[in-house]
Amino acid sequence: MKKIVFLVISLLFVYLEPFAFTRENSLNDSFRLGKDELGPLISLAELNSKMSQLPESVKKSIVNDADKVNNISVSTLKAISASSYSDYQTLGTRSSYDDINNDDLTNLKKLLLAEVLQNNGRYISNIVAFCQRFINRKTWVMPAHVSKVEKGDAIDLGAVDISETLSWVVHLFKSKLPKQTVSALVKELDSRIFQNYISKDMTWMGFNKGTQVGNWNPWCNYKITLSLSLLDDNISESTKKAVFEKSKRSILSFVNQYNVDGYNSEGPVYWQQSIPNLFKYLDVLKAGGYSLSIDKSLLQKSLQYIQNMYISGEYFVNFGDASPRVYFFPVDVYMASKGLNDQKMLSFSFFLSQRNNVSTKPTRGTITQAINTIIHYQDLNSKGTPSFKRGIYYSSGQVALARTYENNKGFIFAAKGGNNGDNHSHNDVGSFVLYYQGYPVFIDLGTGTYTKQYFSTGRHNLMATQSQYHNVPQINGTDQRQGSNFVGVNPEYSSNENNMKFSIDLQKAYPKEAMVNSYKRVYSVSYLNPQLTITDRFDSKKSGGKTELFFMCINKPELNGNGEMILSIENKAKIVMNYNKDKFRPVIEEVKLNDNTLRKNWGREVVYRIHLQFIKVSSGINEGVITIKGL
């Protein structure tokens, strides 16, 4: 067979002549499938050459990490068992499975990289042993998704992550592995992944009308087609063609639903699993001899979204199940930016690389991300200074963002309308977050630990998903409800050189028990002298109801009794929150974070909730104004 060299990695697909974008993109069926066109994928020799150019300290770290794993007697490790799955059903937890599975994948990655670097067979024995652990498993599907298998969804996120890693093992070490190991791996990958993919129309593929298509689609399609390409002539030509053809139809179901302004309704964490994988899928598709036309503008906007959502450090704007702190893999942004020739996003990828210390830790992430980072190591050590837009509005999600200064001296603000029925949404129509000098002040708690309850009918009984733990009002004692029919209406946005204004009517986000004809919230951000003004004006159908405004904040506010609260941030700077003391009664509540993920996100055991209670609510029009500014 002809040697295949250098794929993953180039990402030099070209979108220079896209057709006019419609919500029903057509396929380009000029298939050019052939054995020699399924690459080029990087060879062992090429990757060894790239790794030899890494700094000595990095190479030493790779070897040391692998040596620790190589000293493990793999047969003594706890294996995935029936209890790993029953724990999810009985206790609602995923950790007993996740801990073992993640360790197995990480250990195999460490051995693989060190074997490529040293290329002397030293780690092959334990590579085979860890591969056998995956071969021995009854299923590669995660416990949370096993019930989907019975409905035909035989491949999930966990299965494709395993497929990706095992395919790299075969691709790089086919000549070093025992023949029976190679045969067993190919057999398992073909039956568990490729044949299931061909024969079953799974929900995430997006073929069922009315189904929301989210991050699973590009995540799975990319890793399955990558695995197929890595295995090359170990897989039949008919299987290759069937998978590639079906993947094209599937990926377009994702593209056709994606917001044309580039907004990702699942948030930055899930953006990382969807958009970079879409770009990498297109690279694998082209390497496989196929073409697929997607509007360049859509791709560019979907990529730029992540820079627009950036705050500082590891903080990104988060709503719904998005975490506030996100570790992004700069190589993913770099490859997509290079493919689009987007210089601003390239600069952002270099900035992320510096922030994430890629120069000393290039092997983070999946095995593919580690390999890509090694290949692009020199470029990723370039310096980058990102530039940010002052005001941004995503009409598809009714999300407004404002920066009073580019260098984080002032406010970074984001607010949303939207609805309470999107993938991974919380009951948070009308909520906002505010950062000052790069530090959190008013926050969205984000996602808690994923458990069985998190994806059940009891999801909105969890603290982090309820509207009363977001920066929204409780109207006449009534909270928001979940569902896409609970929605913000009549959004208005404007931005000029002096200020940004965003307003939304929240009335339809609440059930009829809220007894309100309208509830308009207006956010106004002054760019020149950092100040946020929040005006709530509502038409109540009754008098005497308990209406209060909730504000989740990171540190305990100080009340001075004169209609002011002082809030401190991590660098000791302060902001002041002003309210009419004749109209509002303030209450400060300590909120214990009863979830490990929430505590990790915010680096503390407790946060605080401000209640600003209307002292009097009249039948008819009521109004309250809050101002927040830096000191």
Image: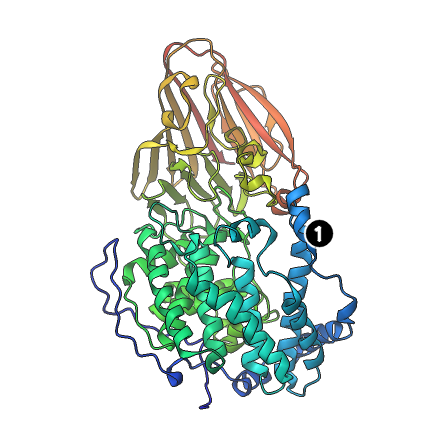
Q: Nearer the viewer, residue 444 or 286?
A: 286
Q: Position of residue 173 (x, y in %)?
A: 59, 83
Q: Nearer the viewer, residue 136 or 51?
A: 136
Check the image and report above or below for 250 versus 503: below
Q: Is residue 81 left or right of residue 557?
A: right
Q: Which residue is mark 1?
A: 83
- Count of numbered labels shown in the rendering: 1
Q: Nearer the viewer, residue 497 or 318?
A: 318
Residue 67 falls in image quadrant: bottom right
Q: At 44% from the left edge and 50% from the top edge, which residue is drawn?
A: 309
Check the image and report above or below for 149 versus 7: above
Q: At 54% from the left edge and 80% from the top edge, which residue is drawn?
A: 171
Helix, strand or loop under label 1: helix
Query: Would residue 11 be seen by someone viewing this image from the given angle?
Result: no
Q: For label 1, count other residues whose C-alpha is less than 10 Å away and answer few (under 14), some (14-19) or many (20+).
A: few
Question: Most extreme residue toward the left, as rendered?
Answer: 20
What amino acid is at disc 1? Answer: Ser
Q: Nearer the viewer, residue 292 or 317?
A: 292
Q: Position of residue 344 (x, y in %)?
A: 37, 63
Q: Is residue 447 left or right of residue 519?
A: right
Q: Is residue 136 left or right of residue 254?
A: right
Q: Position of residue 62 (x, y in %)?
A: 66, 75
Check the image and report above or below for 185 versus 264: below
Q: At 57% from the left edge and 52% from the top edge, which residue is drawn?
A: 146
Query: Would residue 137 be seen by someone viewing this image from the given angle?
Result: yes
Q: Position of residue 300 (x, y in %)?
A: 33, 60
